[in-house]
């Protein structure tokens, strides 16, 4: 959680990893890019509801209903490679301030110190911007993208997380007061992206977790998300923007792809592809297979890919579907921009291991015992 001049970590109620915290000491001066708004779509047909999540990414019972998908572009094969001019290169950025690093500095003599320091604190992770606070947003984003990451020549991962009605009113509720305010917030976020390579994980759960919205509300949200992608990419053509695909235990690929298409994820003007498994536990193999199915159903250009959150999926998801700090999990694959898998652009740590979903500690706060269990399993 970042401020204009320095980076600090919040222990607020939003489940996730690092979040940008407003220090109310500076204001944005950059003019946002001018991008036209998306038309609000006609209401979608009513669909059966599922129980909403109350965490960053829950595991509701997957729907067996497959929504109709507009005719896609010719499907890509399993072995098709990413276009080299679209790939992000280099190394991922590790933010110098976080709750886990605060714990490391304060507990040098703790027997868990070495394991947590080497296996969690030493890995690059995403930086979340979860508070609304638009007045200082541009400066706070720039402190990451044009400050620390640019100075190190590394690629930051940033997470805009302020969509209205966030988390269906669950543990991570909050966000902008309405979609007009959100559109303006995104303009300010985009103005801080700089000109270097950056990965944007756009609004976890914002597409997959929309059963709690009416058809009209869902269509309006998707229009704002489509606009958000265009604004972000117009502000920085080197930004790679990924849209929410939930995870392999949630919505069926066809249903998820239909929603993603309406949210702009199939358009190269707004999207570089999809992300999955944020704050969840499904195995990398399951996510790779699921993401490819979603991409095939989505259509769009062959350059669209996927990024996967591998921060806590080393043992896969619990058999009972528990999402809130389940026991027996462990950290997954190290974050990398070189996966060796066709159409899988990166493995990322979007949710920082050790930050609670709300059961082993307050949502979003670092819990050393939980971190140690994940890192030593």
Image (cartoon, rainbow, N blue to C red):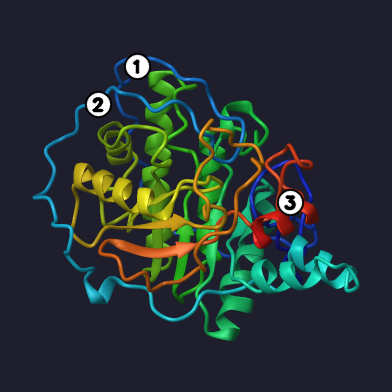
> Which is more N-terminal, label 1 or label 2?
1
The residue under label 1 is 47
Q: Nearer the viewer, residue 111 or 351?
A: 111
Q: What is the number of the mark on residue 67?
A: 2
Helix, strand, or loop for circle 2? loop
Q: Nearer the viewer, residue 63 or 29?
A: 63
Contact? badges 2 and 3 (CB < 8 Å): no
| C-alpha separation, residue under disc 2 versus residue under disc 3 | 38 Å
* x and y percentages locating residue 36 in the rendered image: 36, 47
Q: Is residue 285 left or right of residue 1?
A: left
The residue under label 3 is 370
> Which is more N-terminal, label 3 or label 2?
2
Q: Residue 87, located in which quarter of the rendered image?
A: bottom left
Instruction: Identify which residue is drawn at 38% across, 71% down.
Output: 238
Q: Is residue 166 above or below residue 196?
A: above
Q: What is the number of the mark on residue 37?
A: none
Helix, strand, or loop for circle 1? loop
| C-alpha separation, residue under disc 2 versus residue under disc 1 | 9 Å
| C-alpha separation, residue under disc 1 versus residue under disc 3 | 37 Å
Q: Quadrant of the image for the C terminus? A: bottom right
Q: Is residue 291 above or below residue 38?
A: below
Q: Quadrant of the image for the N terminus? A: bottom right
> Which is more N-terminal, label 3 or label 1?
1
């Amino acid at each position: 959680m970042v401020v204009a001049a320095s980076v600090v970590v919040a222990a607020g109620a939003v489940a996730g990893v690092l979040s940008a915290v407003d220090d109310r000491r500076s204001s944005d001066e950059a003019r946002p890019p001018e991008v036209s708004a998306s038309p609000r779509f006609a209401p979608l047909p009513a669909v059966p509801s599922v129980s909403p999540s109350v965490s960053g990414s829950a595991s509701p019972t997957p729907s067996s209903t497959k929504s109709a998908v507009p005719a896609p572009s010719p499907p890509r094969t399993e072995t098709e490679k990413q276009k080299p001019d679209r790939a992000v290169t280099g190394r991922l950025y590790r933010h110098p301030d976080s709750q886990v690093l605060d714990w490391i500095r304060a507990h040098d003599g703790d027997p868990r110190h070495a394991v947590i320091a080497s296996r969690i604190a030493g890995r690059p992770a995403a930086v979340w911007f979860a508070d609304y606070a638009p007045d200082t947003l541009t400066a706070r984003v720039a402190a990451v993208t044009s400050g620390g990451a640019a100075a190190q020549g590394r690629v930051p991962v940033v997470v805009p997380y302020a969509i209205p009605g966030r988390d269906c009113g669950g543990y991570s509720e909050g966000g902008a007061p309405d979609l007009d305010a959100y559109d303006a917030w995104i303009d300010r976020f985009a103005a801080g992206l700089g000109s270097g390579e950056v990965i944007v994980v756009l609004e976890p759960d914002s597409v997959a977790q929309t059963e709690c919205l009416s058809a009209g509300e869902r269509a309006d949200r998707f229009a704002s998300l489509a606009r958000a992608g265009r604004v972000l990419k117009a502000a920085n053509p080197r930004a790679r923007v990924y849209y929410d695909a939930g995870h392999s235990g949630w919505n069926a690929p066809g249903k998820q792809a239909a929603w993603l298409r309406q949210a702009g994820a199939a358009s190269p003007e707004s999207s570089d592809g999809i992300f999955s498994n944020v704050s969840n536990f499904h195995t990398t193999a399951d996510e790779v297979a699921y993401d490819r199915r979603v991409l095939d159903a989505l259509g769009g250009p062959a350059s669209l890919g996927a990024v996967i959150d591998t921060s806590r999926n080393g043992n896969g998801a619990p058999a009972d579907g528990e999402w809130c700090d389940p026991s027996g999990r462990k950290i997954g694959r190290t974050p990398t921009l070189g996966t060796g898998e066709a159409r899988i652009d990166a493995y990322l740590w979007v949710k920082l291991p050790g930050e609670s979903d709300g059961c082993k500690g307050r949502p979003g706060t670092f819990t050393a015992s939980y971190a140690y269990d994940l890192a030593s399993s």
